[in-house]
Image (cartoon, grey):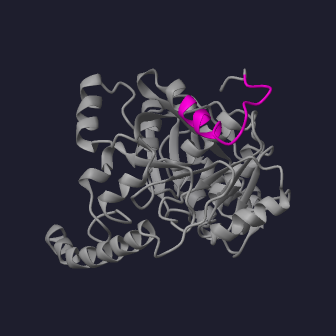
Amino acid sequence: MLRYLKFLLYPFSLLYGLVMWLRNRFYDRGLLSAVEFDLPVIAAGNLSVGGTGKTPHVEYMIRLLKDRYKVATLSRGYNRRTSGYLLADEQSTAAEIGDEPMQFHDKFPDIRVCVGEERMLAIPQLLGDEPDTQVVLLDDAFQHRSIRPGMNIMITDYSRLFTRDHVVPFGRLREGRAGYQRANCIIVSKCPPAMSQAEKQALEKEIKPLPHQRLFFTTLQYGALSDMITHQPVEIPKSATILLACGIARPEPLLDELKRRYKQVYLLSFPDHYYYTEKDIAKIRKECSDLPGTEKMVITTEKDAVRLHLLKDTLAEQNLQMAVIPVEISFLFGEAELFNNFIFDYIGRYLPPPVNDNLQLT
């Protein structure tokens, strides 16, 4: 029944899609102005509403660039409890700058992390605060047309390709499929690690990249667990019972990974970008204690960890230990170097090769 009721949303999708189409045409024809900056600006985003694995792709580029250039990230700071432009410092929290920027700030203290809803205004403010900035990574800015980035990277989920989706609310696209034409680079994320050449060719045929576009395929790689508070390594026997407590758009890939590692895994899901309360901590603790088995552990994501850290005193009072599982991406078909050079070639239009250009990404 719900499946048929969903079709009632289709007229609203058509209307929203028309509004977005008109907006994009105004930008394309110069009726709405877009600002360019005289430094490399790389935008990473997607056509759909969340869940494409954008954050680990931005982190990949941070690792690629941070030892060669002065790198800054600029995000909207979705669901933060502040507004306006902010440059992260030692006192910043997820509540002030948002969970994803806080994750960047925690993991890469040697780069600049800032947030601002009006990114065309935030970049000049960033350059005023940090004038030696050489490369700006725009996080989740594919629809932010008021800035014209030199490099537009669009990420689409393997299991929810934009070519098979529709505009919200009938589907999950923020704009019509034709928006992909703005991308310089398309990445199909969350692919199976053993994806075949035949499937790759089939997806290339389906996506039909334009002559100016490069197409890459990536998969997720989950790392070793660490304690959320102490950051020390955590060893959990395969026979343990696991509670995955997280608030992310699509927990299914992580849930599958944990089921490969452990005998029993249960999911306690919260909304994406959710800010936990003391009641939630008590609920997590109770859910864990009610699970079968003698050895139990709560596991969460890095993105959740920066929000949960706001309640570290409550976690200590509840005597609740939580382990964090990191996630990275890797390029399939041996194309990491092709992607790296694609990025370096773009930056090379603005900047000379750095003295330490022999550094390798690890």
Q: Is residue 29 above or below residue 153?
A: below
Q: Which residues are magenta?
A: 341-357
Seen from the viewer's position, the closer of residues 247 and 346 is 346
Q: Is residue 224 left or right of residue 128?
A: left
Query: How many numbered circles does the render carry?
Result: 0
Left or right: 125 with respect to 149? right
Q: Which of these two is toward me, 264 or 292?
A: 264
Which residue shows up at 76% across the image and 60% down it? Answer: 317
Residue shown at 65%/36% (left/top)?
Answer: 348
Residue 261: where, in percent of width, then height? 48, 30
* Residue at (47, 44) in percent of width and height: 292
Image quadrant holding the N terminus, namely bottom left
Q: Is residue 277 visible?
A: no
In percent of width and height, residue 216 lies at: 42, 35
Q: Nearer the viewer, residue 21 or 249?
A: 21
The picture quadrant where one finds residue 225 is top right
List x then y, in percent, for residue 219.
Answer: 44, 34
Q: Is residue 171 positioned above or below 252 on the image?
A: below
Query: Position of 91 compared to 242: left or right?
Result: right
**In which quarter of the view is residue 199 placed?**
top left
Q: Residue at x 31, y 53 (%)?
A: 162
Considering the image in quadrants, where does the C terminus appear? top right
Vertical placement of 212 versus 113: above or below?
A: above
Rendered view: 87 above or below 319: below
Asked whether residue 81 is in view, the answer is: yes
